[in-house]
Image: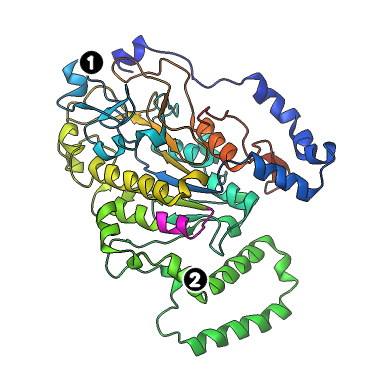
Amino acid sequence: MTEYQQQHRRTSPFVLNRRSMLRWGGVTLAASAPHLLGLNTSQAETLTEQIASADQVLFLWLPGGVTHHESFDPKPEAPEEIHGPIQAIATNVPGVRFAETLPNLALQMDKIALIRSYAAGTNDHFEGQCYALSGKNILPGGILSEPNFGSFISHQLGATADLPGYIAVPGSTRPGEPYTNEFISAYLGEKFAPFCTWGEPRNPDFKIRDLVPADGISDVRFTARQSLRSKLETTLKAAEQNGAVEGMDQLYGRAVEMLTSPKIRDAFDVHKESEASKQKYGMSKVGQRCLLARRLIDAGARFVMMDYGYDWGEYNNLWDNHCAPVQNQPHMWKMCKVPYHLPAVDQAFAAVLDDLGQSGKLQRTLVVYFTEFGRTPKINPQGGRDHWGYSGSIFFAGGGVRGGQVLGATDTIGGFCKSRTFSPADAVATVYKAVGLDPETTVPDRSGRPVPIQNTGEAIPVF
């Protein structure tokens, strides 16, 4: 533990409050609330729709631990060894400043509710990422036992516009070793797993892998295969009672529908965007991934995740800026200005907010940016910043969020939160509130036991 950590040593910022204690005893009551209120199913659904401030979610996911010092929480008054040459700039909201790496997002601050006291309470990538993706702080042994919150939203609210209920662009992040898929539906079943686009949208030959028939499969052969499966289903009906088989059947049905639907294929065809649109987002990886994600939101998709994670063979984990020799990265204060680093995020995220704002979609689309943790206030001997689970920054926009506000604050060097700390559970609870989901809603786990979709966390007051 560093001297700075020892000086600020404290217990976990997350407490088991009275609401959390009552939640377990109130699960049955929450599940029965519509009946107790005299509401039928249709009326209960209408009530949920009235509570919801968002119909769609665009999740901007940057795993790896994005630096908050060089982005949303600059500390120009701190000693020079903390902030270095990075300057703070004004945003379009008086009194709110970003780092100079985010000039475009600075002009979108009036749409943003910025959370500066976000803390996962862990310095471990894998634990922090699974916590952020599920909203549940699970012990390492059960870290992949909980569904992504995107899967819960798809499960509870259903798919829209004939598109999958949970789409990941590209959904290829596999931290490790061993390399592990964190984008999971767990006990909800394969039907609610994310549909991953794979591939790289900025490449001229980009195609959605599962939207084109396999090589050598003509339309005639494809139709014949559908017919054969239909005949086999008649004799395998009993086997379909098995949950795993049923899940695969659901995936097959979804795949066939997507392969044969011009409307769906069109929604995924980022090449149909104008050259001006592509340039607005930038030809970076994050830029073209955001462009495809926005296109899917425009098409009516319920939940779209823009995944910018681990790029093995090119940038490795782009945001894990220890600047260790093996990473071949420049000093943190140079790395944050590399065009494909924060400047690319700035251009792409600002384009998303601007486009959705101009089209009117932002009003009913919740845009959320998460990373698992921030980075150390002090630069390490290699010129980088290390893992820091005590503070970091995330933001919300659209979907009923009141823009132009900052919630929470860190100390003078961006080390520890000096106000209420918001956890990944709180962040996910905020998303559930926006889409009208009661976190006490229960779903059956693998053993059939009812469990709440969220067992800790309070929605952040961004609305």
Name which residue lies at 43% across and 33% down: 403
Q: Which mark is residue 231?
A: none
Task: Give whichever of discs 1 and 2 has the lower sequence position.
Answer: 1
Q: Mark 1 or mark 2: which is in front? A: 2
The structure residue drawn at horizontal position 25% and vertical position 40%, both measured from the top left corner, is: 342
Which residue carries the number 1 mark?
77
- Residue 89 seen in the figure: yes
Kind of residue at badge 2 = Lys
- Neighbor class of circle 2 (other Cα within 10 Å; few <14, some 14-19, many 20+) is few
Left or right of 121 on screen, residue 236: right
Label 1 packing within 10 angstroms: few (<14), some (14-19), many (20+): few
Q: Residue 153, image x and y in percent?
A: 59, 48
> Of the numbered discs in the image, which one, if any, rests on residue 263?
2
Count of numbered circles on the image:
2
Residue found farthest to the top: 7
How far across and how far down the image is residue 441, in percent? 69, 40
Q: Secondary structure at mark 2?
A: helix
Q: Is residue 178 visible?
A: no
Please state which of residues 199 and 400 is positioned toward the viewer in this rendering: 400
Work out how far the residue at label 1 is from the one at label 2, CA to CA, in angstroms.
53 Å
Range drawn in magenta: 293-302
Magenta region's main secondary structure? Answer: helix
Quarter assignment of residue 247: bottom right
Quarter of the figure with the N terminus:
top left
Regarding mark 1 in the picture, which secondary structure is present there?
A: loop
When the figure is inspected, residue 385 is found, relative to residue 453, above or below; the finding is above
* 301 falls in the magenta region: yes
Work out whether residue 119 or residue 328 is closer to the camera in this orientation and state it. 119
Residue 233, how many percent across, how many down? 69, 78
Identified at 35% across, 30% down, the residue is 374
Tag 1: residue type?
Glu
| Horizontal relation, residue 275 to residue 139: left or right | left
